[in-house]
Image (cartoon, grey):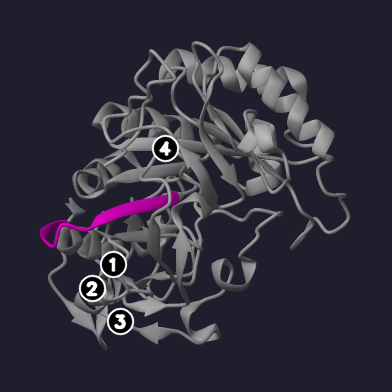
Amino acid sequence: MINTNRTASVNNLTEAKFYQSLDGRTVQCQLCPNNCFLKNGQRGLCGVRENINGKLYSLSYGKIAAFNIDPIEKKPFYHFLPGSKVYSIGTPGCNLDCKNCQNWDIAHRKPEEINTKEMNPEEVVREAIANQTGIIAFTYNEPTVFYEYMYDIAKLAKEKDLKTVVVSNGYINSEPLKELLPFISAFKVDLKAFDEKTYLDLNRGKLEPVLNTIKTVKESGVWMEIVNLVVPGYTDKKEEVQKMCRWIKENVGPDVPVHLSRFWPNYQLTNLPPTPEKTLIEVREICLKEGLNYVYTGNIDHPEGNTTYCPDNDKVLIQRDGYIINKNLVDKNGQSKECPSQIPGVWR
């Protein structure tokens, strides 16, 4: 029987959702595709979910490792309330092991290994309101691993008329995802590669569950944007990019914004050079030729890659300088006098 309700705590720890007790001592976590089998005292690959006497507990509930006020464009969301500020939080832990991790100092740390700030969901919501952000972002590390904390915050935020956004690797099972989505305003998925071997080598994960997440979010009606990190020698192959674009267009449509992000050497890939700016621009052109309407480039100074164009006449609708909005001609209904099409997104 799968546990979906929290009923107990041990030493102020929160019992996890989505796990199965197998023999009274061993449990299987069923939150993400790792589906870890854990004996008493063992933790999952995420490092933050532990079997304690036959029950699974979240070790990171309420333990914030990073928080900040960010522009929504930094997440990145380009079609979700442009120019907004968000109250961003993250905790220790991650359920993938990406060689190119940008936040490895918290994502690959256990809660006891770093300094954290204790905040309950009510305090997080109060801080967001006090900072006049109106949006809470679950980000920095993988939000799936602090699912219970995220769920409780998101549910309370909705009651207080706040928006919530998830910045995720998409590595989550369907049942917990579907239970979470009614309380989420927007969801960003990192599609880290479009090849199973590359996914395993680069991220120690599988592609198919991420594709399932993308389809599930789209079907839910929650606004979604996709990020693809272009890593030299890993995800910059033309054929793979074409396959990715064709899958996106066929399964979730041409209007889902796709962000192509420049790789910068970090963590276990300091031996690689940064992605050449020329490569990123070429990959964007491939995506546009494959029929995707809104393709952006990140981590480079490329005005075209930061601009939202009308898909019918190429008129400039939203012009950005980094995270700053210089011009926005899209009204609250997604309409513009410069463009006959309604621009998909959340504008009000």
Q: Position of residue 192 (x, y in %)?
A: 60, 40
Above or below residue 215? Residue 268 is below
Q: Quadrant of residue 345?
A: top left
Query: Considering the numbered disc 4 on the image, is that residue within a helix, a strand or a loop?
Result: loop
- Percent from the top left, x then y, of residue 102? 65, 60
Looking at the image, is mark 1 or mark 4 nearer the viewer?
A: 4
Q: Is residue 175 left or right of residue 156?
A: right
Label 3 sits on residue: 119
**Residue of label 1:** 149
Tell me the distance, in whole angstroms, between the alpha carbons under discs 4 and 3: 30 Å
How far separated are the C-alphas under marks 3 and 1? 10 Å
Query: In what element is the residue under mark 2?
Result: helix
Q: Which region shows up in magenta?
A: 158-167
Label located before the other in sequence (4 or 3): 4
Amino acid identity at mark 1: Tyr
Marks 1/4: CA–CA distance: 26 Å
Say which quadrant the C terminus sits in. Answer: top left
Residue 19 visible in the shown view: no
The residue pinned by badge 2 equals 121
Q: Earlier in the sequence, mark 1 or mark 4?
A: 4
Taking depth in this image into account, of 283 and 272 the one nearest to the observer is 283
What element does badge 1 sit on?
Answer: helix
Q: Nearer the viewer, residue 323 or 128?
A: 323
Q: Looking at the image, which residue is at 76% across and 20% down?
A: 238
Q: Can you tell which mark lies on residue 79?
A: 4
Dot label at residue 25: none
